[in-house]
Amino acid sequence: MAKARAVVQVGDKKFELQQFDLPRIGADDALMRVEACGICGSDVDQYDGKLNGLLSLPMIPGHEPVGIIEEIGADAARRWGLKAGDRVAVEPTRGCGHCRACKRGDSRNCRTGRPGAKISVCGFIPTTIAPALWGGMAEFMYLDPEVALHKVAPAVPAELAALYQPIAAGVSWAHRVPGTKVGDTVVIFGAGQRGIACAAAAREAGAEHVAVIARRQSARRLKLAEEFGADATIYADEDVVARVRELTRGEGADVVVDVTAETLAPIPLAVEIARPGGTIILAGVKGPEAAIPDLKNDRIFSKELTIRGVKNADFDSFAIAVKLIESRKYPFEKMHTHSFGLDDLELAINTLAGRVAGEHAVSVSLDPLL
Ligand SMILES: [Zn+2]
Ligand SMILES: [Zn+2]
């Protein structure tokens, strides 16, 4: 029987390369040959052991995969509108398809998930649940009937197609959820791949001004943000409130998006930067115990702000992201900085995390053929 090589996380900072039997595909499911799998901040946390409350080891990590349909059942082909040989981007969440959240089309908030997995997201489902190949850091991945897929044009290089998740996050956070309109000013805290994607999405929404704020050590990423639609970049140690006031003729920003990880500092600033009636999107993971200090209740009240948490992207945001990548309207090839093979996942994660001297990663992906 044919086998697939896969990286398996077996403990904190501990990967093993293992082989798994390829599953038998029935009428309603499919098998995908992985071309590339994006790596994001949560992969770093997963590797470090910071997400242990959510992990059910052993597991194949990787929740940002693109690949080619290798085999597909007749019912699945009809339902998804796909055939063998088509390329797809895979949404991470695996809803049960039947609970109240799933019936509302909100499978990201499905609480049923997969029995035995603490969270039902590909890359987080343990290999003890058949057929094991749930993660993208593998040669092949199993596509169960409930997965949401998006067809991607074959002309796009795989490592650029693998940017669909950060781009979808940008579309969700800087365009669709806050309802960004033509003429708006959008201010983004964070210049990683998601911050840069937010700049492009705000620009696509018709924003007049797009400002990105990041630390001085992220100067290269801020420069790149300019190529993705930012018309102002601000260092976090500047007088951020004054700079935004200047940019908006004293009005304040219509939309403020915080995508930074771990630091809470942007949130009280966002309250000052937002215009009265403005919207603040909180999309950065700060750690389970992090609580916001210095948040002035009466500023939120008197400015009538909307503060909205968003954890990832919905179906339409993914669909828009794929089209945006296919358009090649932005220099996505500059966003993708590193590719590694399956044997080098550890190095890939450390590169994205900025732990490899001399490397300046923005987006890193794994390519099982390398
Ligand atoms: Zn991710
Ligand atoms: Zn469900």
Image: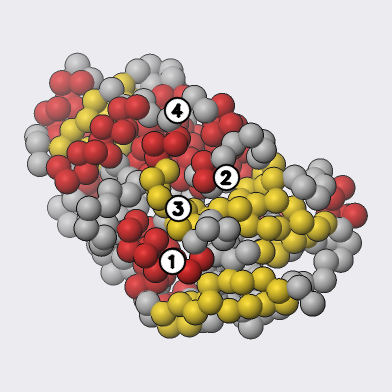
Q: Mark 1 points at which residue?
A: 344
Where residue 349 sits in the image (x, y, percent)? Answer: 38, 63
* Three-letter amino acid code at the position of disc 2: Ala
Give the Cα distance between marks 3 and 1.
Answer: 10 Å
Residue 297 makes an appearance in the image? no
Q: Which residue is drawn at 42% across and 56% down?
A: 40
* Mark 4 lies on residue: 330
Residue 277, horizontal then vertical, whole percent: 33, 30
In the rendered image of this protein, does residue 38 appear above or below residue 51? above
Which residue is tagged 3?
Answer: 339
What is the three-letter code of the residue carrying label 3?
Ser
Q: Report helix, strand or loop for mark 2.
A: helix
Secondary-structure class at tag 3: strand
Q: How crowded is mark 4: few (under 14 residues within 10 Å), some or many (20 or more)?
A: some
| Residue 233 x/y as whole percent | 22, 30
Q: Do the residues labelled 4 and 1 touch (CB within 8 Å)?
A: no
Q: How far apart are marks 2 and 3 (CA)?
A: 11 Å
Measure the C-alpha gap from mark 4 to mark 2: 16 Å
Inter-mark Cα distance, 3 to 4: 20 Å
Report which quarter residue 327 is drawn in.
top right
Which residue position holds label 2? 158
* For marks 3 and 1 on the same chain, the one whose residue lies earlier in the sequence: 3
As measured in the structure, the alpha-carbon distance from the residue carrying label 1 to the one carrying label 2 is 18 Å
What amino acid is labelled 1 in the image?
Asp
Mark 3 vs 4, N-terminal side: 4
Say which residue appears at 89% left-offset and 55% top-offset.
75
